[in-house]
Image (tube, rainbow, N blue to C red):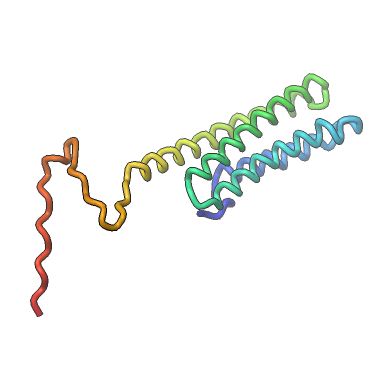
Amino acid sequence: MQDFRNIAAWRRSHELTLFTYRNTLDFPDAGRFGLTHQMRRAAVSVESNIAEGSSRGSDLDFRRFMFIALGSLAELEAQAILSKDLQSLLPKQFQALLRSIVVNRATAWSLVQTLEASIASAASVKTLKPGEPVKPRQGPAASLKPLEPLKPLKP
């Protein structure tokens, strides 16, 4: 578990949320409780899922929350396209928002890959239960000789 504020993906997603809030201020009143709310909710969802996932007890849980965050990024992108097509977002605002979404997606995906490598590494290490016999090695390490048991120290 780590402080989510130190995670690059969270910091970038927080910037995206602030950008989204600022750029939806001038949306028409008719869309204030529709598209405005949906875009803000999607942006907040990205950073919230990264924060919550980082506080979970395992990389597997964190990875699951990262996929939810990636889904929220896709949702925000679709809503940005709609906002542009409805002319609620100016082309310049849309391009800046889209660039931020792309950067956030790449950063989040990089974190997912790091988590997946950690999960795979942890899965390859088997913890023996008390009394469980050790299986013989296979592969290149099979030719290694087992260590001799330690002899008790003499006083």
Instruction: Pinpoint residue 71: horizontal percent, then vertical percent.
Output: 62, 32
Q: Position of residue 33 (x, y in %)?
A: 86, 35
Q: Residue at x 77, y 40 (%)?
A: 21
Q: Residue at x 9, y 57 (%)?
A: 148
x and y, in percent, of residue 102 in the image: 60, 29
Q: Quadrant of the C terminus?
A: bottom left
- Report the side of 128 relative to 54 (left or right): left
Residue furthest toward the top? 85
Above or below residue 123? Residue 80 is above
The answer to whether 77 is drawn above or below residue 50 in the figure is above
The answer to whether 7 appears left or right of 47 in the picture is left
- Could you tell me how many numbered marks the image carries? 0
6 relative position to 124: left or right: right
Can you give x and y, in whole percent of width and height, for residue 4 in the image? 57, 51
Res. 137 image quadrant: top left
In the displayed orientation, state which residue is furthest to the right: 29
Q: Residue furthest front?
A: 131
Seen from the viewer's position, the closer of residues 60 and 4 is: 60
> 153 or 37: which is nearer to us?
153
> Residue at image x 26%, y 52%?
132
